[in-house]
Amino acid sequence: MSNGKINKWLIALTVMLPTLIEIIDTSVVNVSLDHIRGSLSAGIDEATWTITSYLVSNAIIIPMTGWLGRLFGRKRYLIFSISLFTLSSFFCGMSWNLQSLIVFRILQGIGGGAMQPISQAILLETFPRKQHGMAMALFGVGIMFGPIIGPLLGGWITDNWSWHWIFFINIPIGVVSILMALFFIEDPHYMQRMKMKIDYWGLAFLTVGLGCLQIVLDKGQREDWFASGFITVLALVAGISILLFLIVEHFFAEHPIMNLKTFKNLSFSTGNIVMFFAFFNLFGSIVLLPIYLQTLMGYNATLAGMVLGPGGVATLIAMPVAGRLVTKTNPKFLLGLGIIVSAYATHLMAQFNLLADFPTIIWPRLVLGIGMGFLFIPLTTMTMSSVRKEDMGNASAIYNLLRNLGGSFGVAFVTTIIARRAQVHQTYLASQLSQFDRVLQIALHQSTQAMQQAGFAPSVSGGAGAGAIYSQLIRQASMMSFNDAFALLSVFMACIVPLVLLMKKGKGEARAEMH
């Protein structure tokens, strides 16, 4: 490789620094949303577009990364992406109204989307095949650490400075990243600028399809899914556009934006399915946990973050261990172990109740962190190691797209399950209440007395007592809906274990070795 004279760890630092910041920016805005909304005089639904716009543009650009790298040259495209991300971060911080912030967030997402697949491809090319496990451990640290540190960092910056600084803090890091990329990144001969006929139809169908799909996933539950004409139309447009994209790319495009022939590799195809459901589980569970803690258990944002944090630390510890073990043992065993441990951790979360203490809640999150650490490394190694280095950019773009879509589908799924199952459980529990029930009569009497002692007039204490009992019924119904969501995540996770058998070990099986 042309960059073989440069220390591989220096190259790794160069590509991972902007990638980590980009991943943090996918979640850093969430905790600052109220401050942004108040500062820019926007409603809640309007303010959430600052998150949706970034996710949409990010999702669209990820699968194009390999193609754009070949079109412009990968080093040139990487520097452009970091520059656009840094410049748009500045303008996000300077936004004068919500509309301007959304526009600059779209540009930020376009700049940031390329960083994950480019970083992964460069790491896999820079490190020899026997060290792919360690390279992916390094990449995984950024992928797993970003969503955990993002909300904590965003909350601290917003509370101590202002929401503008969650964007301004990217600027010095972006400048350093640009300089490092200029000096330490070189393109191999197969990733230098190529003359290609632009696939306009593929570009259009992909942009419209993924853009509409991401909006559907992000807004679906809030709009009551297909009861909303807006969601129904977007879902139809997304489905038709993605179908047409697949047809155009497979049969007609001379230089396709996404080379679907890569899916002929069984290990690669299977690995993408496993990765989709792994992040479906991970993002679904780490979204459910803080909602459960803050809405039902009375935790504040800081305490909820303390529950998520140790799980991230467990992942950071597990990944380097898995990176070493993957070259010394059968990676299929490690992957199967990681999936089973992750499924078991989510099963433990399905046992939560309204009396759970802090250790009971934090333990499954630690177990999930370990499971994900042992899952990510062998999965990525087996998925990518049998791909030719010339196809690595395209394969990495597809892999990162499926990972992100898995997370988006997981979040949409669990939020829908919570809303729908809470209604089912509430209806069922309410139907079990009877005025002739002796236990209910005793509870009503005790609750009424408690209300009178609290200062309620006798004329209203009965109604207040009944209201207190019903509020507990709603809490129990909500708790049961969380149990249902965690249980389903656990089942989905366990169901992908057999897919491990279809994957190859990924040791020396590639058609082209690195020189």
Image: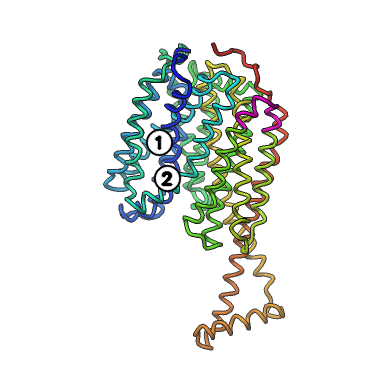
Q: Position of residue 480 (x, y in %)?
A: 64, 59
403 left or right, relative to 343: left
Characterize the magenta stretch by its predominant secondary structure: helix
Label 1 sits on a secondary structure element that is: helix
- Crowding near pointer 2: few (<14 within 10 Å), some, many (20+)? many
Residue 158 falls inside the magenta stretch: no
At label 1, the amino acid type is Gly
At label 2, the amino acid type is Val
Task: Please tell me whether residue 103 is drawn above or below residue 447 in the rendered image.
Answer: above
At x 63%, y 56%, the residue is: 360
Viewer-side label of 2, 1 = 2
Label 2 sits on a secondary structure element that is: loop
- Crowding near pointer 1: few (<14 within 10 Å), some, many (20+)? many
Comes first in the chain, label 2 or label 1:
2
Q: Position of residue 333 (x, y in %)?
A: 71, 31
Q: Looking at the rendering, in which quadrant would you find the C terminus?
A: top right
Identify the residue under disc 2.
28
Q: Position of residue 29 (x, y in %)?
A: 40, 46
Is residue 501 or residue 260 the one in the foreground? 501
Q: Position of residue 375 (x, y in %)?
A: 63, 35
Task: Please tell me whether residue 400 is drawn above or below residue 228 in the rendered image.
Answer: above
Identify the residue under disc 1.
109
- Find the magenta span and give its range: 322-334
